[in-house]
Amino acid sequence: MQNIISLNQSKVIVSKHVVANVYQDIDNKQFALHAAIAFNKGDVIADFSAATTQSYASYLTVQVDTDKHITLKPAFLQYINHSCEPTVFFDTALMQLTALTDIKPGQEFTFFYPSTEWDMAQPFVCNCGSKNCLQLINGAKHLDKKTLQKYQLTQFINQQLQLKKQEA
């Protein structure tokens, strides 16, 4: 039995977890992770670790160092989509997912992909719908300092920005 969760009945719950539920859109087949409970800004939503580590990026990895990309454990965290107005942050130093905003039950978790990705393996045109949407998402390397100052960034991305500044 599938659980329909939205008013327009276009999404089904694929899996339930203590802090979040994975939804799938019936029409476009896309997955998304939504809060199962409320979180306040700054709350630790989940601890995570590396299920696997590899030297190359993929659409399922989070970058933690120059040639170090991890798949996430717990695996349901892989369903956190991009937004130019993110609700969560992957702190790869503490290995914690934290709330950037107050999050209500049912609200989608989203993160800013360039907050962890220097030069993305699969750039894409963003359709997050934010009034501040950046349009092309291809990694922090390709964004200006003014844009990046609006976001919380991982230690790795901040280190890369310092190196880029020194090379300029």
Image (cartoon, rainbow, N blue to C red):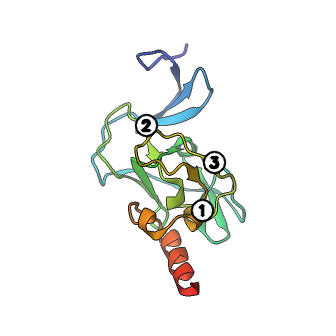
The residue at 58%/65% (across/down) is 142
Q: Secondary structure at mark 3?
A: strand
The residue at 52%/81% (across/down) is 165
- Marks 3,1: beta carbons within 8 A: no
What residue is shown with label 2?
108
Asked which quadrant contains residue 168, the reply is bottom right
What residue is shown with label 1?
63
Q: The residue under label 2 is which amino acid type?
A: Glu
Number of marks drawn: 3
What residue is shown with label 3?
124
Alpha carbon distance from label 2 to label 1? 22 Å
Q: Secondary structure at mark 2?
A: loop
- The x and y percentages for residue 59 are 66, 49
- The x and y percentages for residue 3 are 49, 17
- Marks 2,3: beta carbons within 8 A: no
Image position of 99 (left or right of 155): left
Image position of 12 (left or right of 102): right
Q: The residue under label 3 is which amino acid type?
A: Phe
Q: Residues within 10 Å of mark 3 (few under 14, many from 20)?
A: few
Looking at the rendering, in which quadrant would you find the N terminus? top right
